[in-house]
Amino acid sequence: MKKSTAIIFPNQLFEQSEMIDQCKDFVIVEEYLFFNQFKFHKQKILFHRISMKKYESYLLSKGKNVLYIDSFKKESDIRILIDQLNNVNEINIYDPVDDWLSRRILKHSKKTKIKLNIHKNPSFITSEDTLKSFFKSEKKKFFQTSFYKKQRIELNILINNGQPAGGKWTYDDLNREKYPKDKEAPKLKTFQKDEIRVNNESYINDYFKNNPGKIEKFIYPTDFKQAKQWFDDFLVNRFDEFGPYEDAVLKEKSILNHSVLSPLLNSGLISPNYVIEKSLHFYEKNNIRLNSCEGFLRQIIGWREFIRGVYIAVGNKERTRNFWNFNRKIPNSFYNGDTGIEPIDDTIKKINNSAYANHIERLMIIGNFMLLCEFEPNEVYKWFMEMFIDSYDWVMVPNVYGMSQFSDSGMMSTKPYISSSNYILKMSNYKKGDWCKIWDSLFWNFMDKQRDFFIKNPRMRMLVSSFDRMEESKRTSLLKTADEYLKTL
């Protein structure tokens, strides 16, 4: 007798869902696109491996039948797995929110004539109606601010009598403080190194020893209980000052007052609804400052949902565009952290130790500098996919091609996110040094080369004029320094 089975991917480890209630037989697969498409950071692989093995135990405890497929088996490729599903006439999956994976599943379920049931993905909260009405693929531009306002109203979050709490939709003007010199970053919740982690560290060393990153300082929750404890620790120790220091950068640390919930939300270990409800309750009961609560929830209901919507609507357009026509490859120095640019090298070394960087380090340090270095956008996408614990196709396509590299020509941004060294100095504890000269030279070189674009942009036009007003000798020196550095890449 033929049967129905449910397939679970590494980023779908949900505690509750209709699919769990309805299905008896499960396949948990270390699918190729999540484990071997690129050389993913060792901590990302370790995070998936441990959380998936724990999830296997969770489903077994609920009386389910579970087949677990390791990454080194040929069936870890979904195309081969579906082709070899014997005595199965029906597959149940959550919406993958992954274009490549979806195409492969659809193609091979059709080829094998297996019925495919696609269930709602509990990782996201935006209604289908909102997705269809706001994210129309024929739209030329998408603006997060208007989407965020719509979300706040529809979800009734921080709304009083139809108006935003405190009278403003966002409090970004209060959220740009530098970390005080004598201030200690909050200590983080830690988890005991258990047997399952020890066993699976050897799995990483056996099968992924040539991948980037180090596993010694792994700190992440890997099950539902730990995820909730991690979130509770954020609420108690970091939530209130999240807002003021949201954009701050420290040479020595990355997490500061950030929640680092993205790997947990993106893998299913904690749900956005749980995070929203508990955050609002904690805000109301503990006198948390409004700019911190609003700024944090905007990441969840605004940016995260917005990125997913853009990906579904125009992700394929974004990833095939190269607006600047850059083709430079990323050298090994951007994996090892020996580029000679102090903030870049420090950030890369922190990433190698943790598979994490905060959003300013990603956008305004790494992404900014990579754009000034004229790297091919596909190379930048690959680097971001490889190096971060929370990286998935739906995350990185809009964030890299759209936000960071502006290679989509502005489908979700009005201008590229670039800056001179001044921004880094302003938001961090870095001091002026030789790196500033190279960074600034690359910035003005970019302005000069792309002047036709910037002259048309009211917000950037003045910078081109500033460059043109410089002494000729200074302009020549800047362009020469930039050229010399680019030749070393």
Image (spheres, helix red, strand yellow):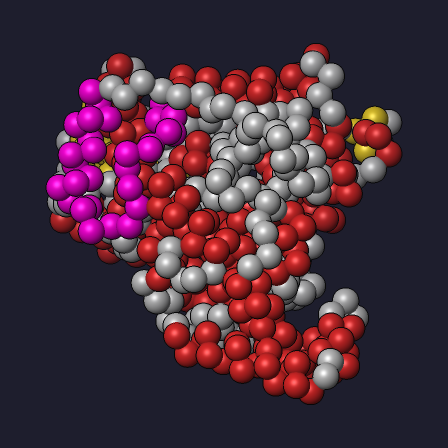
The reply, left or right, for residue 18 in relation to residue 176 is: left
List x then y, in percent, for residue 76. 20, 45
The reply, left or right, for residue 145 in relation to residue 334 is: right
Work out whether residue 34 or residue 202 is closer to the camera in this orientation and state it. 202
Work out whether residue 375 or residue 183 is closer to the camera in this orientation and state it. 183
Tell me the magenta residue range: 195-223
List x then y, in percent, for residue 198. 20, 26
- Would you say residue 287 is visible in this rendering? yes
Using the image, determine if residue 357 lies above or below residue 450.
above
Q: Please state, as top left, top right, bottom left or bottom right, where the N terminus lies in the image.
A: top left
Indicate whether residue 203 is drawn in magenta.
yes
Q: Quadrant of residue 246?
A: top right
Work out whether residue 405 or residue 319 is closer to the camera in this orientation and state it. 405
Count of numbered circles on the image: 0
Work out whether residue 139 or residue 235 is closer to the camera in this orientation and state it. 235
Using the image, determine if residue 43 lies above or below residue 310.
above
Residue at image position (70%, 40%) is 177
The reply, left or right, for residue 482 in relation to residue 10 is: right
Q: Please state, as top left, top right, bottom left or bottom right, where the C terminus lies in the image.
A: bottom left
